[in-house]
Structures are given as structure tokens and as C-alpha cells.
Image: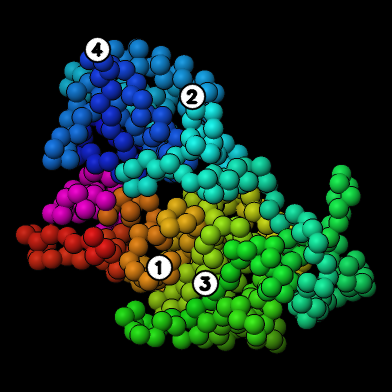
């Protein structure tokens, strides 16, 4: 929650993706809940959460001053009454501890902390209509979400598992049988004598979850999981038109005319399905990793925690992706490290995903298919295993998510903290791929080009070392320093 105790704290405020200030004086000047409060409430709830400060005015120089709210009781009554009116807003996310009246220099300020809504609560919308009343926070603006985005949010809300859907009209003819046979061979190697191996193809797929009968409707056929894992490219794109998988190996020189050294995309020379993409991409990811000479008994062990972390990261990307979203699966290998991009946002907060223990996999059937052949983790232990394999080896890991240009999450594994891995979202420089704190720093620097690192630390409540680390990352592609540290200024390169 935002720390506000003095007038200096008010003066240092900057509106950004998690802070919004509103005057809230009302017609009589004594205080009222602003009409546009609810747009910000919806936007924060559907984004990263944030704090709304009532009784604060923005001056012409983009700094803020406290005006105060004379009648806080009226404002609070309006707030709680409206929160419990479903025609006003779809969900009350607030508890009493999230709403505070602060006394700053003898004037009252109302602070409302809006938490991020859970997947089951989103979208949080206004006026009884999600299609016309859903907002999201982009930088310091409350933006009305387009209809396609809202429908995706509604689908995420009601569908715990996305890949169990029966693809009506699709049959085993739509499968790549070489892929299915290769999977059988991997299962045979992992679990010799497994009873499913004796089944015919339809029976085998049924046990895997790749073929399903709906007892309620009587429909039967390939599931989305079966088609994505083992299907042929033309058939996959009929069922999931936005499906695309992309592996890129890029040169060290980001200004090079050669955009990639090696690339894997569905190009007609292979099936294009998820299982074959995994088999092709994982070999290239680990191709030149150093392997120490370690014996287990009399057998040399060629697997290391780094190998395991990369395999787990790739599987994690494939089973958590929203294959109906507009971004694509993107896996990048560079001399500085690796990047794994998922279409779709995380289903749990970043901090919770990093800690593990909470599993909310978007494609559980595909996850089980990988588990059957000894790949991946369940019960929320996937990211902790990646962290153990990568960070514990002395390397840098970062997980973030973004709404721009499309919903996506990014896992970066870098050899050192200062190394930068581009997210490949666009050819130009973009804020996508940065975490919320880094985007906040860029916003603050855009508003004050002479701001110091010490001032950034004071404004954000973060340590100097944290700000210095994030500034080093931003300077790789988004930020440059003009002049000396004492008399110079910042320049955001995409402004």
C-alpha cells in the first residue's frame, strides 16, 4: 500500500499504473465521491491493483497538493453503498482496512487501496454490462477494454481448464501420426510396460485426455489438448486460429541486420504441433550448455540443474499458454540468456507463482501429457523448480506480465543481472516485457527528466540498490543518460 504521511509525500506523488489522485470536493465543496472514481476502481481491479487518493489536486507542473475532504463521512457512505450496488459495480473487493482517512497537516485525505481481482472475479465492470463497463489501467490512464478482451476475461473466469474442450468435427485424420508414435516411444522409455501402450490410437488418446466423450451432450471427438499436442498445422489453426509457436536464436549484436541465427516456426516442413515444437526447441536450448564431468555410479551424468530449469521453463510456457489469445508462444535464445513468452496473463499473482504451492494451470490435460513422459511439474512447483535450477546456480531470473500490446507473461533467464533479453513483441522499443515497477520508473522519468536515483528510491519506497539494478536494465534498451550524473538528464529512447 502507498505510504503517505507528510506534505512532502504528496508533493512527490506521480500518477502511474498504480496511483490515481482525485480532487473529490463535490458541488458544495465539502466533499463527494467523484463520478470517475469507479472507472479507476474497475481499471485497478482488472490490472495490477493500486491506490486512489481522494482530496488531492494536480497542479500545472504535474505536482500534487492536498486540498482535503471536509465531509469524509459522506464520501465513505457513498463508497460503501455503491460498492454493494451490483448496478454500479459488479464486485466489492474492499475490506475496511483498505479504506483509510489520513490526517495530513490538518487536512483529511481518503486513501482507497484497490486489490487486483482474482481470475474468478474478473472482469470487474460498471453499469451492469461487462462489454461496455470494463476498464484496465495503462500507465496513468483508465482505458475501456475492447469487447474481445472482455470476452477472454469472461472465458478465463468460467473455464478452469481450457484444453478439455471437444473440437467438434475433428477426427484422428487431423493428427500427425509420427508425433503420436514418438510420444508412445517416449512413454515406453519412461514407463516400460505401461498398460496404455497396448491400446489402439483412439484408446490411447482417450486415456491421455486427447479424446473425450461428453456424457451430457453425447458429443465425442478430439479435445483441444489432443489436437494441439499431436495435430497437423492446418487442422490446429482451424480450431485455434491464433495459434503460433516461435523459437528464435538471436545474435549478440541487437543492431545486426541478421535478426536470428536459427528459427523454428510452423513452415510446412514439420507438423507444427506443441509436442514436436517442444522436441525441436529443447534440443536447441541446451545444445551448447557446458556439462561438468560427474559420475553417478559408473555412468556420466549429462543433466544439470540448468538443463532441468530450461526444460521446465519450456514445458511451463506450453502448458500455461492461452492459445486463443493474440500473442504467440515465443522462445528466444541469446548469448545473454533466454526468454519464454506466454500468450495470456498469469492466473495467480507473480509473487504467488514464484513461491509455488498454488496450481492453476490453464491446460491441465496437456500438463498431464507432459508429466506422463517425465516432463513438467504439478501442484504449483514448476516455477520454484526453475528458480532452484537457475537462481541457485548464480544466475538472474525475472517473471513479469503485461497488457501491451496484448496480454502476455514473460519469464527471463539471464546469465547475469545486467544482461538484457529483448522480448520480441515488436521491432521497435516497447515497454512490454518490463515488470510494473520498471514501467513505473520510466513514467516517473518521463515526467521529470532530471530526477535522481535517490529521489526515485524515496518516491517508490524501494532501496537504492533495487533502483540502481532496474535502471541498469532500463539503460539496455529504454533509457540513456545525457551528460554527467550530477548535471545531466535522462532520455527515454521511445519518447
Examine the structure image and report whether residue 456 is included in the region drawn in magenta: yes
Say which quadrant the C terminus sits in: bottom left
- Residue 331's tag is 3
Residue count near mark 4 (Cα–Cα under 10 Å), binned few <14, some 14–19, many ≥20: few
Foreground tag (2 vs 3)? 2
**357 lies above or below 384:** above
N-terminal label among 3 and 1 = 3
N-terminal label among 1 and 4 = 4
Judge left or right: residue 200 versus residue 37. right
Label 2's element? Answer: loop
N-terminal label among 3 and 4 = 4
Quarter of the figure with residue 405: bottom left
N-terminal label among 1 and 2 = 2
Query: Mark 4 highlights which residue?
Result: 28
Say which quadrant the N terminus sits in: top left
Query: Mark 1 highlights which residue?
Result: 426
Q: CA distance from mark 1 to mark 2?
A: 38 Å
Picture residue at 13% right of the left edge, 54% below the top: 450
> Are discs 1 and 2 less than 8 Å apart at CB?
no
Magenta span of residues: 443-468
- Residue 338's tag is none
Query: Which residue is situated farthest in the left direction here?
Result: 487
Query: Mark 2 highlights which residue?
Result: 88
Q: CA distance from mark 2 to mark 3?
A: 43 Å
Picture residue at 86% right of the left edge, 56% below the top: 220
Foreground tag (3 vs 4)? 4
> Are discs 2 and 3 less than 8 Å apart at CB?
no
> Are discs 3 and 4 less than 8 Å apart at CB?
no
N-terminal label among 4 and 2 = 4
Judge left or right: residue 416 versus residue 192. left
Amino acid at each position: 500500500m502507498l505510504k503517505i504521511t507528510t506534505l512532502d509525500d504528496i508533493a512527490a506523488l506521480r500518477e502511474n499504473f498504480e496511483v490515481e489522485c482525485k480532487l473529490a470536493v463535490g458541488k458544495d465543496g465539502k466533499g463527494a465521491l467523484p463520478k470517475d472514481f469507479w472507472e479507476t476502481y474497475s481499471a485497478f481491479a482488472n490490472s495490477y491493483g493500486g491506490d486512489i487518493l481522494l482530496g488531492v489536486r494536480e497542479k500545472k507542473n504535474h505536482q500534487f497538493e492536498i486540498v482535503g475532504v471536509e465531509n469524509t463521512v459522506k464520501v465513505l457512505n457513498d463508497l460503501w453503498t455503491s460498492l454493494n450496488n451490483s448496478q454500479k459495480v459488479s464486485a466489492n473487493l474492499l475490506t475496511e482496512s483498505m479504506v483509510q482517512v489520513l490526517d495530513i497537516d490538518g487536512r483529511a485525505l481518503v486513501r482507497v487501496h484497490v486489490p487486483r481481482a482474482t481470475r474468478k472475479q474478473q472482469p470487474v465492470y460498471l453499469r451492469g454490462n461487462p462489454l461496455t463497463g470494463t476498464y484496465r489501467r495503462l500507465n496513468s490512464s483508465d482505458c475501456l477494454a475492447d469487447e474481445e478482451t472482455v470476452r477472454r476475461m469472461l472465458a478465463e473466469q468460467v473455464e478452469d481448464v481450457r484444453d478439455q474442450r471437444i473440437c467438434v468435427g475433428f477426427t484422428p485424420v487431423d493428427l500427425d501420426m509420427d508425433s503420436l508414435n514418438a510420444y508412445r516411444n517416449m512413454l515406453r522409455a519412461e514407463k516400460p510396460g505401461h498398460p496404455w501402450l497396448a491400446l489402439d490410437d483412439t484408446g490411447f488418446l482417450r486415456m491421455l485426455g486427447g479424446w473425450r466423450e461428453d456424457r451430457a451432450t453425447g458429443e465425442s471427438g478430439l479435445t483441444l489438448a489432443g489436437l494441439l499436442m499431436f495435430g497437423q498445422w492446418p487442422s490446429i489453426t482451424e480450431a485455434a486460429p491464433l495459434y503460433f509457436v516461435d523459437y528464435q536464436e538471436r545474435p549478440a549484436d541487437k543492431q545486426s541486420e541478421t535478426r536470428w541465427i536459427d528459427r523454428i516456426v510452423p513452415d510446412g516442413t514439420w507438423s507444427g504441433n506443441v509436442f514436436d515444437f517442444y522436441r525441436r526447441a529443447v534440443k536447441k536450448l541446451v545444445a551448447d550448455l557446458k556439462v561438468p564431468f560427474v559420475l553417478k555410479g559408473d555412468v556420466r551424468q549429462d543433466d544439470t540443474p540448468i538443463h532441468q530449469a530450461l526444460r521446465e521453463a519450456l514445458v511451463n510456457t506450453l502448458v500455461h499458454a492461452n492459445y486463443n489469445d493474440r500473442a504467440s508462444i515465443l522462445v528466444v535464445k541469446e548469448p545473454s540468456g533466454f526468454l519464454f513468452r506466454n500468450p495470456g496473463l498469469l492466473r495467480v499473482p507473480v509473487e504467488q507463482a514464484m513461491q509455488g504451492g498454488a496450481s492453476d494451470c490453464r491446460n491441465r490435460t496437456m500438463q498431464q501429457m507432459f508429466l506422463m513422459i517425465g516432463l513438467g511439474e504439478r501442484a504449483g512447483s514448476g516455477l520454484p523448480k526453475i528458480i532452484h535450477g537457475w537462481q541457485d546456480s548464480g544466475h538472474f531470473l525475472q517473471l513479469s506480465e503485461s497488457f501491451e500490446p496484448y496480454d502476455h507473461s514473460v519469464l527471463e533467464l539471464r546469465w547475469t543481472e545486467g544482461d538484457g533479453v529483448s522480448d520480441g513483441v515488436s521491432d521497435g522499443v516497447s515497454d512490454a516485457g518490463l515488470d510494473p515497477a520498471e514501467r513505473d520508473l520510466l513514467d516517473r522519468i518521463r515526467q521529470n527528466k532530471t530526477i535522481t536515483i535517490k529521489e526515485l528510491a524515496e518516491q517508490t519506497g524501494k532501496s537504492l540498490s533495487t533502483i540502481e539494478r532496474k535502471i541498469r536494465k532500463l539503460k539496455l534498451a529504454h533509457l540513456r543518460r545525457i551528460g554527467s550524473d550530477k548535471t545531466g538528464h535522462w532520455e527515454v529512447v521511445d519518447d
